[in-house]
Amino acid sequence: MSPLNAPAAVAPTTGISTDTSRLKSKDNLDKAGEKFEAVFTGMMLKSMRQAKLADPLFDSKAIDTFTDMQDGLIAKSMAEHTPLGIGKAMTDFLAKSQSDLNQGAADSPP
């Protein structure tokens, strides 16, 4: 094979994007805060469910599974509509360390 026909050396790809510009957006930070709020609320609901005050009338693994799924949906809904504020506190804290987000917040009107 001549050097003209030789295949070019191609760097192996891992399938992981190296473009990190999207990671420093206010929308992504807000979404992360909302998801954190949902996880925190879900953990709180789960811990309240574990503190059983009486034996349930109908107890089974299926009911436990559906209760867990219901608690997850309730936690997500609470985080979207009536947040506790822990997600906002987390996003505010993280935004302080990202100068790009602080610059954008200073430029936009309140």
Image: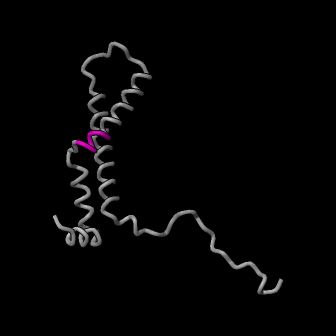
Q: Position of residue 110 (x, y in %)?
A: 16, 64
Q: Residue at x 44, y 22 (%)?
A: 62
Can you say whether 77 is above or below 10 in the image? above
Can you say whether 93 is above or below 65 in the image? below
Region in magenta: 76-81
Which residue occupies the extreme front position in the image? 109
Among the 4 quarters of the image, the one containing residue 66: top left
Q: Position of residue 85 (x, y in %)?
A: 20, 48
Among the 4 quarters of the image, the one containing residue 38: top left
What secondary structure prevails in the magenta region?
Answer: helix
* Residue 90 in the figure: left or right of residue 11: left
- Residue 77 shown in magenta: yes
Can you say whether 94 is above or below 41 in the image? below
Which residue occupies the extreme top position in the image? 57
Which residue occupies the extreme bottom position in the image? 3
Q: Residue at x 29, y 56 (%)?
A: 30
Can you say whether 51 is above or below 92 in the image? above
Among the 4 quarters of the image, the one containing residue 70: top left
Q: How is the image coloured?
A: one colour
* Number of dots carrying numbers: 0
Which residue occupies the extreme left position in the image? 110
Q: Position of residue 90 (x, y in %)?
A: 25, 55
- Residue 99 shown in magenta: no
Q: Residue at x 32, y 44 (%)?
A: 39
* Residue 73 in the figure: left or right of residue 53: right
Q: Residue at x 58, y 64 (%)?
A: 14
